[in-house]
């Protein structure tokens, strides 16, 4: 369950951005999209961006994911970041390791959805109250 979270997708590929938007909307998330770092920071600079999590393409056009991540952390440190790349070698990059999660791009959305859920649960625990298995008499 997504608890009404809005996800900021920063993805350079229009095809992948559309796919991610479709998948996240189908799972009940709200979505805000950016095609490059300029659009990403324009959204954040508006001051009312509702994003609870940023899904950041590590190959983001013009600036690149590494630099965009550093700027994102400096400008909006409260927003957790899931690094997303089609190059698995980035998983071992020291900057990627500072992200809240890393997920390799693939046709199956499940690993991404699981990683996002884990990050959201860790960063917003009050929105995921534990279900009590003990009956109250």
Image (cartoon, rainbow, N blue to C red):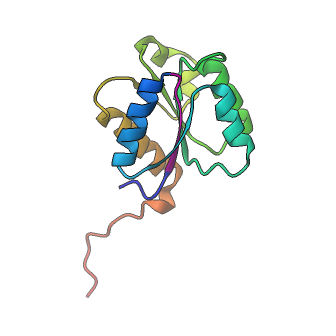
Percent coordinates x, y for residue 40 in the rendering: 64, 33
Percent coordinates x, y for residue 76 in the rendering: 69, 41
Q: What residue is shown at x 38% (from left), y 40% (from top)?
A: 22
Q: Is residue 115 left or right of residue 34?
A: left
Is most of the magenta stretch helix, strand or loop?
strand
Q: Which residues are magenta?
A: 6-12
Q: Nearer the viewer, residue 92 or 105?
A: 105
The answer to whether residue 106 shows anywhere in this view is yes
Q: What residue is shown at x 65% (from left), y 45% (from top)?
A: 78
Q: What residue is shown at x 57% (from left), y 20% (from top)?
A: 60
Outermost residue to the bottom: 137
Q: Nearer the viewer, residue 101 or 53?
A: 53
Percent coordinates x, y for residue 133 in the rendering: 26, 69
| Residue 124 included in the magenta stretch of the image | no
Q: Split into 4 quadrants, where in the image is the C terminus?
A: bottom left
- Looking at the rendering, which quadrant does residue 24 occupy? top left
Percent coordinates x, y for residue 72 in the rendering: 67, 33
- Looking at the rendering, which quadrant does residue 85 occupy? top left
Q: Split into 4 quadrants, where in the image is the N terminus?
A: bottom left
Give above or below for 46 relative to 99.
below
Q: Is residue 33 left or right of residue 26?
A: right
């Amino acid at each position: 369950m997504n608890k009404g979270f809005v996800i900021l997708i920063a993805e350079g590929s229009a095809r992948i951005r559309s796919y991610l938007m479709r998948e996240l909307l189908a799972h009940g998330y709200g979505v805000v999209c950016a095609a490059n770092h300029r659009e990403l920071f324009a959204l954040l600079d508006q001051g009312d961006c509702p994003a609870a999590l940023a899904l950041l393409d590590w190959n983001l056009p013009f600036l690149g994911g590494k630099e965009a991540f550093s700027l994102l952390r400096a400008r909006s440190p409260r927003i957790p970041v899931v690094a997303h790349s089609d190059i698995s070698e980035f998983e071992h990059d020291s900057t990627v390791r500072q992200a809240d999660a890393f997920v390799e791009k693939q046709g199956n959305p499940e690993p991404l959805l699981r990683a996002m859920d884990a990050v959201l649960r860790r960063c917003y625990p009050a929105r995921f109250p534990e279900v009590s298995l003990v009956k109250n008499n």
